[in-house]
Amino acid sequence: MASYLDELFHTARHLIPVLDGQRPNQTHHLEAAKTRSDSPESWPDVAELIASLHHTINKAHPETGAPYWRIRSWGLLCWQPIYLALICVYHLRAVPSNIATIKQKQVGEMVCGYQLADDQWLDQSSHEALIAHLGEGLHRLFQSYQSELIVQQGGRPILYQALLADQLIETMLYLQSYVQQQDQQNHHHFDLTAEYLLWADVLGLPTKALQRLQIDQTSQGPQFVRQTCCLHFRREEGNFCASCPKTNKPKKNKVL
């Protein structure tokens, strides 16, 4: 019988191929990652990873400026842990106790690939308890990223928390159909607003981001306008994102 960690690796890789996990000292699956050896040096600590990201993004997009470099770095640091957390809670219905020890790999301008060791998993608990348990580890992880990012690149905690809130909601929306399928199999109903509030409570995130979650009048599906701007438009080839707050003004009705 596969372990929860093996199931996490398999499910994450199936959803997004570059969301590729391994145990310590295990050969990495990503061909792109094999451009660097899988020695301990290729799995940097937090300070090294943030410094490397800053150097790479700065060199690739010097025209964007420091605000873009720090916002891009933050998003890259957080995206894999967010996906893994949602997979654990809504698919595996079991959560690891060591998510705060995750190591991540940089490949070019991306962060893709992660390392997580076997550990105890919580599986005989309520849905709320799973989120609380995993959320505590995530909170420690994100706090370590935020503290080091502020030291190296500046920025205010309120900015990083608002960015994380937007990123979490967007990821939940992206995975909504998958999560709903799992919920139907387990006779549960997925309420995105209620679920976000559970995560926001343990992660210390603002809840006003939910005011920007609405029903699209054309598709009748959920639509989200970010509170924060990723500044992608500052890149030479960049443009405004579909959910950019600079080009979208959320209506005051039909809030989910």
Image (cartoon, helix red, strand yellow):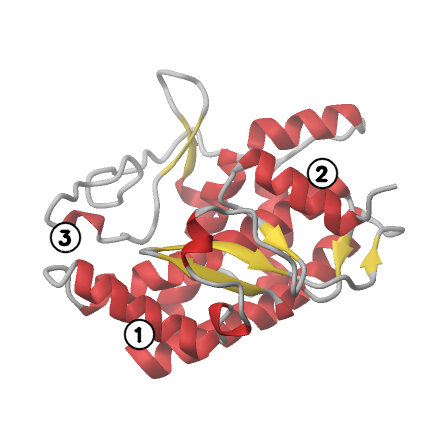
Write the residue at 35% across / 63% down.
Answer: 73
Q: Nearer the viewer, residue 32 or 18?
A: 32
- Residue shown at 15% from the left, 65% from the top: 65
Can residue 62 be seen here?
yes
Tell me the residue that label 2 is attached to.
91
Return the mark for residue 155: 1
Q: Amino acid at mark 3?
A: Arg
User: Which of marks 3 and 1 precedes in the sequence?
Assistant: 1
- Does residue 156 appear to the left or right of 194 in the view shown? left
Helix, strand or loop for disc 3: helix
The structure residue drawn at horizontal position 60% and vertical position 65%, both measured from the top left corner, is 102
Label 2 environment density (alpha carbons within 10 Å; few <14, some 14–19, many ≥20): some
- Are the residues at dot 1 and dot 3 in contact (C-beta closer than 8 Å)? no
Check the image and report above or below for 152 versus 183: below
Relative depth, front residue between 201 and 103: 103
> Callout 1: few (<14), some (14-19), or many (20+) C-alpha neighbours within 10 Å?
some
Q: Which residue is mark 3?
A: 234
Mark 2: secondary structure: helix
Residue pictured at 35% horizontal, 66% vertical = 159
Q: Which residue is at the far bottom?
A: 151
The spot of residue 199 in percent (x, y) is 61, 54
Q: Amino acid at mark 2?
A: His
**How far separated are the C-alphas under marks 1 and 3?**
18 Å
Residue furthest top as drawn: 218
Residue 197 visible to the viewer: no
Q: Residues within 10 Å of mark 3 (few under 14, many from 20)?
A: some
Badge 2 or badge 3: first in the primary sequence: 2
Q: Quadrant of residue 161?
A: bottom left
Between the residue at mark 2 and the residue at mark 3, the CA separation in whole angstroms equals 37 Å
Amino acid type of the residue that numbered disc 1 sits on in the rendered structure: Gly
Task: Give whichever of 251, 181 is nearer the camera.
Answer: 181
Quarter of the image where one finds residue 11? top right
